[in-house]
Structures are given as C-alpha cells and as structure tokens.
C-alpha cells in the first residue's frame, strides 16, 4: 500500500482559518515548516503572456459549493482539483503582469520584488500540472500540497507590499498606490478563496486516507465521534454571527485589558440565534477590526463603563427581493456586488470600458440575487470621529504619511494617523494570514474590512456623532440557501 504523507501545513492552515472556533481554540500554536520539495517548472515571459491572454472564468459561489457537501468522494475531489487548476494559473499571470506594469524603480524595491518573485514561484509550481488532468488520489494529494504552498507563500503579501510602497513613495503617487492596492486586495481575496476552498474540501474528505490505511471500508469514512459539519469547504452554511462576535469580543477584550487596564463590555441585541451561509474567517476579521476601533475609542474617551451595543438584524426577504424581481443572475453587475477586480486586465493598458468583460469574469456572485443576509450594528460611546478625520476613514493611512511618520512606521514606532505611541489594539489586525504586527500602524483596518464585506455584495457604513459616539453598520449578503 502506497503511503503518502500530507504536509502539516495543510492541517495547520485549515485549523487556523476554517475549522469551527472551538476546534481552533484547542490549537493555539502551529508549526510552519514545509519540508516537501515541490516539483516546479521555469516560468517564461511566453508562459505569462499565454496565460494572461486567456479569458477568466466567470466565477460564482455556485462553483465553490457545486462539488457537494463533504466528505467528498474521490471523483468529486478530482473535479474540485481540476476546476481549481483551470482557474488559478491565469489569475497568477494577471497579477504578475499587474506588478510588472508598475514603474520599474518601484518593482525593483526589495519588498515589492519579493512579492513579484512569490507569484512567479507559485506559477512555477502550477505549470507542471497545467497540461494534465488529476485522476488519481496520489495526484490529488500532491496538488493539495501545491495549494497549501501557494496559500503559505502569499500569507504576508499585503503588509510586504505596503512597506514596499512606503519605501518607494518618492517614485509613485499615493493615488496610484491606493488604486493598485484596492484592485490587488480584491484579486487576492478571490485567488486565496479558490485555493483555500479546495484545501478545505480535501481536509474534510476521506478518500485520500486510503493511501495511508490498509483498511478503507465505507464504515470508516464517517467517524461517529465527529458530528456532521455545516461547512462546505470554507463556507459555513449555518454561520451564527453571534458566535463570531463572542469570539472576537474575547480576543479584543483580553488585549485591551492587558494594554489599558480596562475592558468595555459588549451587549448583543436583536436576533442572536440567526444563522446564514457565509465565510467565517472573513466575518471574523471584519468584526475584530470594527470591535478594535470601538474598544479603543471607548477606552481613550474614558467611557469604558458604557456598553458597546451590537445589534444583529436579518435583512428582510421582501427588502432583498425588492426591485430585483425582473433581474436575472446574469444581470448582476460588478457595481451591485462591489467586488471589482480590475487590476488583472487594466495592467495591459486597456481603458475602463475595455476591461468590462474582464471585471465581470472575475466576480464572485451570490447563488441568487435575493440571498439571505444580515446587518450588524456596532454602537459605541467613544466620542465619535472628528470632522477632519471622517473624510479619510477609508484611506490607506500610509499614503498620507509625512517623512517623520514614514520613518517611525518603518521602524515600528508610530501609529499611522495620530502619531501617538503604538496602541496595543493595532497589533491584532492580521487579515488573510498576515502576521500579528505586520499591518500595525499602516491604516489598513477599515479599507480592508470593507473589501471583504463588499466582495460578497455587502458593505460597511459609518455614522459618527462627534462628541458622543459612532454607529457602524456592517451588511453581509449570504451565499445562498445550500441544501
């Protein structure tokens, strides 16, 4: 019997990102060593041009759940792997072209050049698979290792790019940096989601275990000690926002008390038992960022005895269906969903009108226009946002740094906006695998949180009453009703 060792990174990535909260809390530390040598193929300029010329698949969330509810059969795993393989090479090639379209002196920056090389590396690991079909369990296991390597390779992409742009600030305008990063964030969300979906499906399925077990009877496929999961890959079809809120509150409260000696309490109102289908890790990042801001404002204004109120309100079905009765799924526009990913084609020099089809092809749309959704309001008594700062809450703060702030941030010494000493809550931001402190002081929280919310047709709105507090409305549209 052939024995294939799955790399530990597959397990650690899945536990860290997509397992239920109670499972992740039992695994507080993870090894990041990756020992298996992946087969690679040299990437030529012709390879990049050929892949980048391919039309991008019009990805929808239907694609992510169409393989069925785990545990998947071997054939379903092959289908997932081959679908993933058909999507990713072109997306990586587009990202390489987008980076190369930056001014040469910017791409030459060591930080940005590292990201360019990371994309080349990931494409080099996919090219050996590009001309073949995955039809054996051995190949599926090896391909999943490639996906795990891709996720790990790009885990710190955003923070590295931000620091690279800080260092190259003399050679590229803040407007160009913001445009590039806005586009890159959405492209990155889609690329990671595709790869991580297959990793999650692999990890939650059983056929590959036949390779390392002499007994593979059907009775061993399901372990009676593990109840049926509500997950389909990265999507929790029974996601309870109140549970994510409780977890995020616990994390933020502990750090807040450690750093400031105080911890505001949270009161959850509305419908805490409401559930819908969504990606938990995205909601967890967004809520952590929003709670961090609310906690910090509350403590710094001396109002820590006032509760932070969080209200969970399902979106009414009649509101979701209103004005949409005569609109088919094909008519859902990129503007409707808020998930523009124009970097992949704009890098070729086309104007906006020419990139319309490319933008549409990169959308991730809900299963239906009227999918169930939720609005979460976070209300604090932290004094609100000053009028001069309110206009800039969606900016990447580093694009407006002066020289002193740049120097302090690169050395880890200052907060982006205020210039004050780094507060403890900045350290807990880390979307999509970025390190705990890697984004601290860079002003990424709200813009990145909004990108995650908008990617599935939601959004974030902020209403501030200066001198009193702020209300933040997070709206999310579910991925649909999954049987």
Image (cartoon, rainbow, N blue to C red):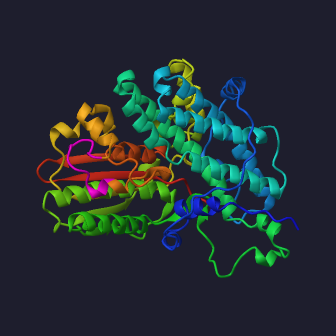
x 50%, y 42%: residue:
157
The answer to which of 161 and 482 lies nearer the viewer is 161
The quarter of the picture where residue 418 lies is top left
The quarter of the picture where residue 306 lies is bottom left
Q: Position of residue 125 (x, y in %)?
A: 71, 42
* Image position of 100 with respect to 271: above or below: above
The answer to which of 423 and 432 lies nearer the viewer is 423
| Quadrant in which the N terminus appears | bottom right
Q: Main secondary structure of the magenta part?
A: loop
Would you say 190 lies left or right of 125 here? left
Highlighted range, magenta: 413-426
x 45%, y 53%: residue:
435
Q: In the displayed image of the protein, which residue is found farthest to the right?
A: 1
Q: Mark yes or no: residue 369 visible.
A: yes
Q: Position of residue 82 (x, y in %)?
A: 75, 46
Would you say 4 lies left or right of 453 here? right
* Image position of 261 with respect to 131: above or below: below
- Residue 425 on the magenta segment: yes
Would you say 220 lies left or right of 14 here? right
Q: Position of residue 289 (x, y in %)?
A: 35, 54
Number of marks present in the image shown: 0
- Residue 177 on the magenta segment: no
| Quadrant in which the C terminus appears | bottom right
Q: Mark yes or no: residue 381 visible.
A: no
Q: Position of residue 132 (x, y in %)?
A: 82, 41
Q: In the displayed image of the protein, which residue is found farthest to the left?
A: 467
x 32%, y 32%: residue:
399
Q: In the displayed image of the protein, which residue is found farthest to the bottom?
A: 225
* Image position of 452 with respect to 403: above or below: below
x 52%, y 71%: residue:
27
């Amino acid at each position: 019997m052939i024995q294939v060792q799955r790399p530990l990174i597959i397990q650690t990535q899945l536990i860290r990102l997509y397992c239920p909260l109670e499972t992740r809390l039992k695994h507080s530390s993870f090894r990041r060593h990756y020992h298996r040598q992946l087969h690679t193929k040299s990437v030529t300029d012709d390879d990049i041009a050929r892949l980048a010329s391919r039309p991008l698949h019009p990805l929808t969330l239907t694609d992510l759940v169409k393989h069925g509810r785990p545990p998947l059969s071997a054939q379903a795993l092959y289908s997932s792997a081959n679908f993933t393989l058909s999507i990713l090479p072109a997306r990586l090639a587009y990202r390489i072209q987008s980076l190369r379209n930056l001014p040469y002196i910017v791409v030459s920056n060591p930080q940005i050049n590292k990201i360019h090389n990371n994309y080349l590396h990931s494409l080099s690991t996919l090219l050996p698979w590009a001309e073949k079909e995955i039809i054996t369990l051995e190949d599926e296991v090896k391909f999943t290792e490639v996906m795990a390597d891709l996720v790990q390779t790009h885990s710190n992409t955003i923070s590295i790019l931000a620091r690279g742009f800080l260092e190259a600030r003399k050679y590229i305008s803040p407007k160009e940096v913001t445009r590039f990063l806005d586009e890159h964030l959405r492209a990155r969300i889609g690329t990671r989601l595709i790869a991580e979906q297959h990793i999650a499906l692999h990890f939650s399925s059983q056929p590959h275990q036949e390779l390392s077990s002499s007994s593979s009877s059907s009775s061993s496929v399901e372990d009676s000690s593990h109840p049926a999961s509500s997950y389909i890959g990265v999507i929790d079809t029974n996601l309870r926002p109140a549970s994510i809120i409780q977890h995020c509150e616990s994390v933020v409260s502990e750090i807040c008390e450690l750093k400031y000696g105080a911890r505001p309490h949270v009161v959850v109102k509305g419908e805490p038992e409401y559930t819908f289908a969504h990606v938990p890790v995205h909601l967890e990042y967004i809520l952590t960022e929003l709670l961090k801001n609310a906690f910090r404002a509350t403590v710094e204004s001396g109002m820590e005895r006032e509760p932070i109120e969080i209200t969970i309100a399902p979106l009414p079905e009649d509101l979701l269906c209103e004005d949409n009765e005569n609109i088919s799924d094909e008519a859902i526009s990129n503007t409707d969903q808020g998930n523009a990913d124009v970097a992949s084609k704009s890098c070729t020099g086309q104007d906006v009108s020419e990139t319309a089809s490319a933008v549409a092809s990169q959308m991730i749309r809900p299963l239906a226009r009227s999918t169930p959704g939720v609005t979460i309001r976070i209300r604090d008594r932290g004094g609100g946002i000053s009028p001069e700062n309110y206009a800039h809450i969606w900016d990447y703060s580093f694009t407006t740094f002066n020289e002193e702030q740049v120097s302090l941030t690169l050395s880890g010494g200052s907060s982006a906006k205020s210039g004050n000493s780094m507060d403890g809550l900045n350290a807990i931001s880390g979307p999509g695998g970025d390190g705990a402190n890697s984004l601290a002081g860079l002003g990424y929280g709200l813009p990145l949180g909004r990108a995650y919310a908008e990617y599935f047709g939601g959004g974030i709105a902020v209403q501030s009453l200066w001198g009193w507090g702020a209300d933040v409305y997070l709206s999310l549209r579910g991925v649909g009703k999954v049987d």
